[in-house]
Image: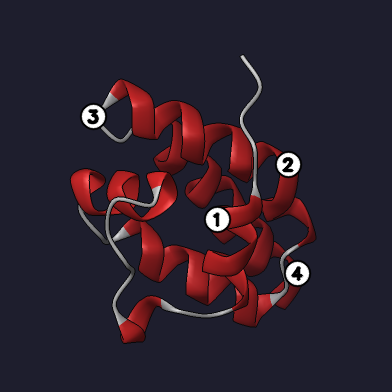
Amino acid sequence: MQDDDIENRRRRARYRSWHRGTKETDIILGRFADAHVSAFGADELAQYEALLEEQDPDIYAWVTGTAEAPAHMRGAVLDLLLKFRVDA
């Protein structure tokens, strides 16, 4: 039952990643989710779900390096996202 729950959360996270409302963030988070979310355990998935609650302009600024992520968002998942490269 717990496996079903985590898989549902992964599916929801992938969907939310591709349907943000800002094309640039959709692409960044969508491709990141496609590449990584299926391997996330409960802890990483919780970190990613928290990231998905943040505003698109903030996420975009963190990814592009124009702003530093706040302390409450820092962790393994954000580090992975910041290292992720989106190929066109």
The C terminus sits in image quarter = top right
**Mark 1 neighbour density, 10 Å: few (under 14) some (14–19) many (20 or more):** some
Q: Which residue is mark 3?
A: 21
N-term mark: 3 or 4: 4
Residue at horizontal 49 percent and vertical 40 percent from the top: 29
State the image coordinates of residue 50 (x, y, percent, origin top left): 38, 70
Q: Secondary structure at mark 4?
A: helix
State the image coordinates of residue 58 (x, y, percent, origin top left): 23, 54
**Coloration of the structure image:** secondary structure
**Mark 4 neighbour density, 10 Å: few (under 14) some (14–19) many (20 or more):** few
Q: Nearer the viewer, residue 84 or 11?
A: 84
Q: Amino acid at mark 2?
A: Ala
State the image coordinates of residue 12 (x, y, percent, origin top left): 49, 48
Q: Is residue 70 above or below residue 3?
A: below
Residue 3 numbered tag? 4
Q: Amino acid at mark 3?
A: Gly
Would you identify the image quadrant in which residue 20 lies? top left
Give the distance between the C-alpha atoms of the residues marked 3 and 4, in whole angstroms. Answer: 30 Å
Q: Secondary structure at mark 2?
A: helix
